[in-house]
Amino acid sequence: MVERYARKQMSEKWTMQAKYDAWLKVEIAATKAWNKLGLVPDEDCKKIAENATFDIDRIDEIEKETRHDVIAFLTSVGESLGDEKRWVHYGMTSSDCIDTAVALQIKDSLELIIDDVKMVMDSVEKRAREHKYTLMVGRSHGIHGEPITFGLALAIWYEELQRNLDNLEQALDVISVGQISGAMGNFAHAPMEVEELTCQELGLKPAPVSNQVIQRDRYANVMNALALLASSCEKFAVQVRHWQRTEVYEAEEFFAKGQKGSSAMPHKRNPVLTENITGLCRMIRSYSMPAMENVALWHERDISHSSVERFILPDGFITTDFMLHRLNNVIANLTVYPENMMKNLNLTGGLVFSQRVLLELPLKGLSRETSYKIVQRNAMKVWEDLQQGKSALNEKGESLYLQHLLSDEELRQSLSEEAIRDCFDYDYYTKNVETIFSRVFK
């Protein structure tokens, strides 16, 4: 329900109604600017601000003849006014209206996306604090490395989302500009004060310089920020999918009562939401390339960018908004299995402690080469034991690796039994968690 509402809230910003509402808002703001400068009489300005409207069906009807959307729009607006309609679009070109209006749409949409990201960050932080000290194995190349905590894994997500939030806020600043600079951007037909007053009315900044359009590197900046956000979110989704694998099974998407995973195999509980998120993120990233292609226009402009933006802007924002709400749902309701995390941590019979042992030996005067040789040969024995089906832990709860190390005569010349056993302490790996959290969750 939340996802559907979010999608509706964002999609409403990209309807034809919303587009023409934004166009009219720009035209009225420009009229008010001319009024402040003394060109448009107070009474005419008041009539335009209060009475100007449009009819979408009428715009479509007029456009069939004019083959020009802005002229069709202005004609429809003019039909709602009297003689005061002569001041609408005065001294402006089509892109003054369109690009300034699209800036309003993008600005509103980006603010929603920013709120979405903050929502996801709140959920990530909550789960990270919940599992600050929940032990699990850290992996590299898909192979067990050393102990970490689930909270630290989620702290990585939070900090990455913070960077994405910074990117989005920077993109919001870049895109929040308008122009009322005329056909070639030289202000030949309207003083610069009209642009300044219009943008002030709309909550935008004047573009320092423009030609016939707002420069499309600004749009590319926005779409790239969404694409980078999507890359991060896909990374999170893939991680959840990995945790949910049967062989891993450390966490999984919430599986509701009555939910079905497969038409053929009733036992299946598939990571369908994160797989969907993965696909959505691929689509969001795909919109960044045409946005970059739009930067290079002929001379002061052509309209090759226009058809592209009719797709990538609404689709990019609506998809991103929906994806973020779905991701938040996954994180907030993620089912976590600490017992399985510990089971996997012990799976390799204590090999996750090998570096700890390695670092103790140079302190006793051994060379790194000799230390590595001692530690590795015992580790290889563990791999052989596991391949032969031996249990990772004996009846005393001692790992295979600990057993082999305690039996190594060369190692025992440097480390006592107590010193070796001390290397198998999980607290050693969590001693800095609090400090890391204080750096991440400021």
Image (cartoon, helix red, strand yellow):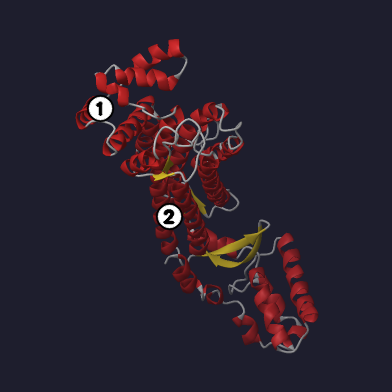
Q: Amino acid at mark 2?
A: Met
- For the residues marked 2 and 1, what is the alpha-carbon distance in whole angstroms? 44 Å
Towards the viewer: 235 or 331:
235
Q: Is residue 342 above or below residue 176?
A: below
What residue is shown at x 39% (from left), y 13% (from top)?
A: 62
- Disc 2 target residue: 121
* Callout 1 crowding tier (Cα within 10 Å): few <14, some 14–19, many ≥20: many
Side of 216 relative to 412 (left or right): left
**Residue 255 visible from this viewpoint:** no
x%, y% of residue 77?
31, 21
- What is the secondary structure assignment of the residue under circle 1? helix
What residue is shown at x 44% (from left), y 47% (from top)?
A: 172
**Residue 437 visible from this viewpoint:** yes
Q: Amino acid at mark 1?
A: Ile
x%, y% of residue 422?
60, 82
Q: Is residue 11 above or below residue 141?
A: above
x%, y% of residue 194?
36, 39
Q: Quadrant of the C terminus?
A: bottom left
x%, y% of residue 69?
43, 20
Q: Which mark is residue 376?
A: none
What residue is shown at x 53% (from left), y 58% (from top)?
A: 340
Q: Which mark is residue 48?
A: 1
Towards the viewer: 300 or 275:
300
Side of 437 relative to 32 (left or right): right
